Structures are given as C-alpha cells and as structure tokens.
Image (cartoon, rainbow, N blue to C red):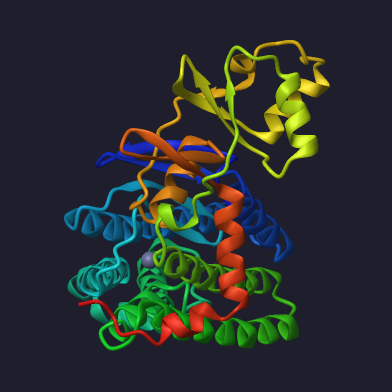
C-alpha cells in the first residue's frame, strides 16, 4: 500500500527508516490550522516541533516492536512513518502466540516508559507546576514548560490507543495471541478483526458527526486494515492445507528457447494455458507469461526467439512444498508459474492464478469456517 513515494531518512540498528511523502501534509495541516486560529509564527513553529517530537516517540515505539521481533529471529524490512502512524514492516510474522504477544506489547510499553521518564523528570524539577500544566492540557499555552506535560500525555494516549483490543492496533495482536492459546489462529483473528471493524464504525459515526476528516480517514483505515488482516489469515490457513503436488497440472506445454515467438502466440489463442515453462537444451531455462507474449505481439516480435522474451532464473519446487511457500516463491521471483520437479523430472507445473482461484473457491465454499474450528497447534 505504501511502497512507493518514500524517502529513506536513516538506518539505525540495521533497520532503514522511511518517511512517506504524505507526511508533508501533517506539517501543512498544522501550519494551516495555526494560521486559521491566528496564532503567532513562534507558536506555529512550537506546534511543528511538537509534531516532530511526537513522531520520534512513534519511531521509538516501532523500534520496540522491531527489536523484540529480532530477538525471536524475525527481521524488520523497514520502519515506515506515515501521517496516521508508524509501521514496523516485519519480513516474517511470528505465528507463535507467545512471541506475537511480546512483539505487540513492546511498542506501547515504550510509550509508557517515555511517559514515566517524563513524569519522573517533571516531578523532580517542580511538582506543583507539572500537575497544573497537565490538567490544562490541551489548552496549555505554547511554551517549553507546557511542552513536556503535553508530550507525556500524548505518550499515554498513544499507549492507551494502541492497547485497544482490536485489529490493526497492537492490542488486537495481543488479543489474538491470547485467544490463540485456546482457539485456532483463524478464529482468533476473526474475533480481533470484527472488534476492530465494529469500533472503527463507531469512530466513523462520531468523526462524521464532528466533521473531523482526519478521524474519518483513520477509522476507514482501521476498518479496511482489519478486513485485510483477516483475509490474509484466511488465505494462509487455506494455503496451508495443500501442497504443490495436490494442485499441479501434469498436462502442460513446454517451449524451447530457440523457437520463434509466434508459436507461443498461437498457443495462448488456442489453448487453456497462459504461462509456459521455457527449456534450453532440455534444461529448465525460464518462464514466459501471457503478458510477455502480448508484449511481443505489440512489438511485432513474431519471428524472434522465445528465449529473448522469457524470464530466466526459474527455480523448481517439489511436490511436498506447501502452497504457502510456493506462492511466496512466485511473488518473490516474479514468475507466474513454477515447474514441479520430482526425481529430476518435471512432473507438472503450478500457476499463480490457479492457486488464487483455488483459495477463492475454498473461501466461497466456507472452508475457512471449518478450519477455524480446528484446535490450535501446540
Ligand atoms: Zn505498535
């Protein structure tokens, strides 16, 4: 969703920190609000500085997740900062409830620690004033003395908001981890996602009544993220049921890298196959997809060798590999189909669209409901 339009700010502890371009909107929005409320330039700068500091706390929160995940052997691809919050994008998600629990808890705990440290600092430096300022939040005047109480309260709000037991908040992950002790991962996810969607609808009605567009966006984001989290676990559960060998097609056409492209053009017009395995000297060479063939048609490449349009570096899978692993390999390598090799021979091919269709049919038939009832693997 947020892959393009990011700028890498730094790399700390081996994790790149990326800023999404839309982050600029936050600064513009704060400036615009300040201008509308007719506050002075120094006060606007003060608010901008507050936003930067707050997002620094969000960044520390994400490092909380990332560093605990690393302890369990899960790498973090990057930490992305967007106007509606940070995301630590893990390369792999832990399916062990206890690990998921600690990874999720670590984020909001960072904000609690920051709030406690700020509180302790302020108590030591002048208690009476601190309570006055904190009580005046958020109407506190724009000065450095009101800055720390504001930051402390903000961190408490961040922690509380993230502990809400609903997807996609950290609290939703904590809830799923706890439910997973008793129920299947799918059923636990469904409960956490449904709570997330219910709460986001309540937020949405409230935001719409208030005319608060930022909150409207956040509630819509929560609603759709909860839905996609659930969808992903539904997919993973269905995919986990079958192996490459169960779905592979044993009647397939291979193409030779030296043959002309026109051969493949005729095949997609006549046959059922859309993507092909390309061989060179009898060995697996690469894949040729329907879009490669259409590309060749556009460029009038009827007479050119297939090897020119094929994508090389095609690695075979074995019949006992899970569909989850196969789909992951396809997405990582960009090949729309893979050869299934058994005893040094191509026993069949497995196609990405075929896997997708299989999962969709299973989900329509309600297979996920059956699977959700299964006991967790312990
Ligand atoms: Zn978090």
Along the line of sight, the residue nearer the viewer: 123 or 180:
180
Quarter occupied by residue 274? top right
> Which quadrant of the render holds ligand 1?
bottom left
Give the vertical position of 253 relative to 135 (above or below).
above
Along the line of sight, the residue nearer the viewer: 291 or 103:
291
Q: Position of residue 61 (x, y in %)?
A: 33, 61
Lateral position of residue 127 relative to residue 191, left or right: left
Specify the quadrant that holds the C terminus. Answer: bottom left
Query: Looking at the image, which residue is at 40% across and 65% down?
Result: 147
Give the vertical position of 251 relative to 303 (above or below).
below
Give the vertical position of 354 relative to 161 (above or below).
above
Q: Position of residue 148 (x, y in %)?
A: 35, 66
Along the line of sight, the residue nearer the viewer: 88 or 158:
88
Query: Looking at the image, which residue is at 51% across and 22% down?
Result: 279
Q: From where the camera sits, is residue 294 visible?
A: no
Q: Position of residue 270 (x, y in %)?
A: 79, 38
Lateral position of residue 260 relative to residue 352, left or right: right
Q: Position of residue 159 (x, y in %)?
A: 36, 75
Q: From where the camera sits, is residue 244 visible?
A: yes
Quarter occupied by residue 296? top right
Quarter occupied by residue 345? top left
Count of labels shown?
0
Query: Looking at the image, which residue is at 51% across and 78% down?
Result: 367
Query: Looking at the image, which residue is at 38% across and 51% down?
Result: 325
């Amino acid at each position: 969703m947020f892959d393009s339009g990011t700028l890498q700010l730094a790399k700390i502890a081996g994790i790149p920190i990326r800023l999404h371009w839309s982050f600029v909107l936050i600064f513009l929005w704060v400036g615009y609000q300040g201008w509308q409320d007719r506050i002075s330039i120094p006060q606007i700068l003060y608010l901008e500085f507050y936003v930067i500091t707050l997002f620094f706390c969000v960044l520390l929160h994400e490092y909380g997740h990332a560093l605990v995940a690393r302890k369990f052997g899960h790498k973090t691809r990057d930490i992305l900062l967007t106007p509606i919050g940070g995301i630590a994008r893990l390369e792999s998600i832990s399916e062990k409830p206890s690990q998921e629990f600690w990874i999720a808890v670590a984020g909001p705990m960072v904000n609690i620690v920051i709030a406690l440290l700020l509180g302790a600092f302020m108590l030591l430096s002048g208690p009476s004033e601190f309570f006055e300022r904190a009580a005046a939040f958020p109407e506190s005047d724009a000065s450095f003395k009101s800055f720390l109480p504001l930051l402390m309260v903000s961190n408490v709000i961040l922690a509380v908001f993230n502990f809400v037991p609903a997807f996609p908040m950290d609290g939703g992950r904590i809830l799923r981890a706890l439910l997973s002790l008793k129920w299947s991962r799918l059923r636990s996810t469904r409960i956490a996602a449904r709570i997330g969607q219910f709460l986001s609808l309540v937020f949405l009605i409230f935001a719409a009544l208030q005319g608060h567009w930022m909150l409207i966006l956040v509630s819509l984001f929560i609603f759709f993220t909860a839905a996609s989290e659930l969808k992903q676990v539904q997919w993973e559960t269905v995919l986990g049921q079958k192996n490459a060998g169960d779905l592979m097609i044993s009647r397939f056409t291979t193409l030779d890298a030296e043959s002309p492209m026109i051969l493949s053009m005729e095949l997609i017009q006549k046959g059922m196959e859309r993507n092909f395995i390309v061989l060179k000297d009898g060995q697996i060479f690469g894949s040729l997809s329907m879009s490669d063939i259409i590309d060749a048609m556009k460029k009038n490449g009827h007479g050119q060798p297939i090897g020119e349009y094929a994508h090389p570096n095609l690695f075979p899978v074995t019949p006992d590999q899970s569909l989850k692993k196969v789909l992951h390999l396809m997405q990582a390598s960009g090949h729309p189909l893979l050869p299934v090799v058994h005893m040094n021979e191509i026993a069949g091919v497995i196609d990405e669209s075929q896997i997708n269709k299989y999962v969709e049919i299973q989900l329509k038939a309600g297979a996920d409901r059956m699977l959700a009832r299964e006991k967790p693997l312990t």
